[in-house]
Structure formats: structure tokens, C-alpha cells
Image (cartoon, rainbow, N blue to C red):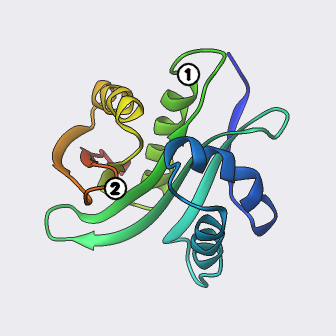
Amino acid sequence: MRDLRLVPLTFDTVAKAYPLIQIGYPQVSFGAWQRRAEAILSQNGPPFLGLQTLQDAHGLIVGLFAYQVMETVQHGRTFFVDEFVAVDIVASGQVANRLVLEMEQLARRCNCSAVHTAVACECHRREGMIQLLSALGHHPEDECPEGPEALAVTHLCKPLTLAR
């Protein structure tokens, strides 16, 4: 089992995370990624918006997701996830599985009652990610094409049981 840990993205590691963005979202330029990451990291107040990385023991970023906590009518406090990317060239699925589990734990720490994940990477990667999330209890809600040259987006939901 690899030693993997969830680490918040910082201004100093924005460039280091870009290769993962390129794998999942090849149409996103470095400038666009840098602007988005820095806008999220510049937010003040409680951590209701953020970027998390999954890193190995050497500090290599092997997973990444952006999140935002919002209130919804359906679930109340909800943990929304975007830019979900996991790369594992050693043990198929281990990184993605760990990233999902860490994402759910963070959602619970934020007192969220559900996780909504938008999966929008390239088609062949998206299907595998949807299968993994489904196996971990996330159910697909819809699929939205984002335009003629954009990637399709599949939204998944998993209600969470909160510790009382």
C-alpha cells in the first residue's frame, strides 16, 4: 500500500499540480488553471472553497480536486467537487479510490450531508471514474454536454451519514 496523504494546494504548488489538470482537462491552459487556482486560494474565511491534492511520500501530486460547500434544498449542506483527477501508473485504481475516500472524509468534517461530484475529463477516463465512484456509492444523476468542443459532464451524488 502506497503512503498517500491529502494536502491542501498552496500558491507554491499550483504549477506542480498543472500536469494533472492537463491529463484530465487537456484544453485548459496553464494561465487559466493558475487564475482559477489562485482565485480559490485567495478566498478568506472558513474553508468552504478549496483545492486538495493527494500526494505520495515524496510529495508527488497524484490526485486533485476542487470543492465548494453550499446549501441545497435537496440535501442541506452539500460538498460540491469539480476538477477531480487521479493518476496511478503503479496500482490501478488505488489513487482514485483513496482520493474519493479522502474527499468523503473532508465532506464529513465540513458537516455536509451529501457529496456532488462533477466528472468532466476525457471520455475514456470519465467512464472509468464514473465506474469507480459508482462502486463507492455515488450514483449518477445526469450528463450534460458542455458544448461542441467541450467535455461532457456527468454529475454524481452520494448522501453521507454524519457522525452524531
Q: What SS does tag 2 mark? A: loop
At which x and y percent is residue 120?
Answer: 36, 48
At which x and y percent is residue 151?
Answer: 34, 50
Q: What's the residue type where badge 1 is placed?
A: Gln
Q: Residue at x 61, y 25 (%)?
A: 88
Q: Name the one closer to the observer, 147 or 158.
A: 147
Q: Name the one closer to the observer, 85 or 133.
A: 85
Mark 1, Cα crowd under 10 Å, few <14 / some 14-19 / many 20+, is some
C-alpha span from label 2 to label 1: 28 Å
Above or below, 145 against 121 in this view is below
At which x and y percent is residue 63?
Answer: 60, 40
Q: Name the one closer to the observer, 1 or 27.
A: 27
Residue 96 visible in the current orientation: yes
Q: Quadrant of residue 28?
A: bottom right
Farthest bottom residue? 44
Q: What's the residue type where badge 2 is placed?
A: Ala
Q: Residue at x 26, y 56 (%)?
A: 148
Residue bearing the label numbered 1: 94
Classify residue 4 as left or right of residue 136.
right
Q: Are marks 2 and 1 in contact (CB under 8 Å)?
A: no
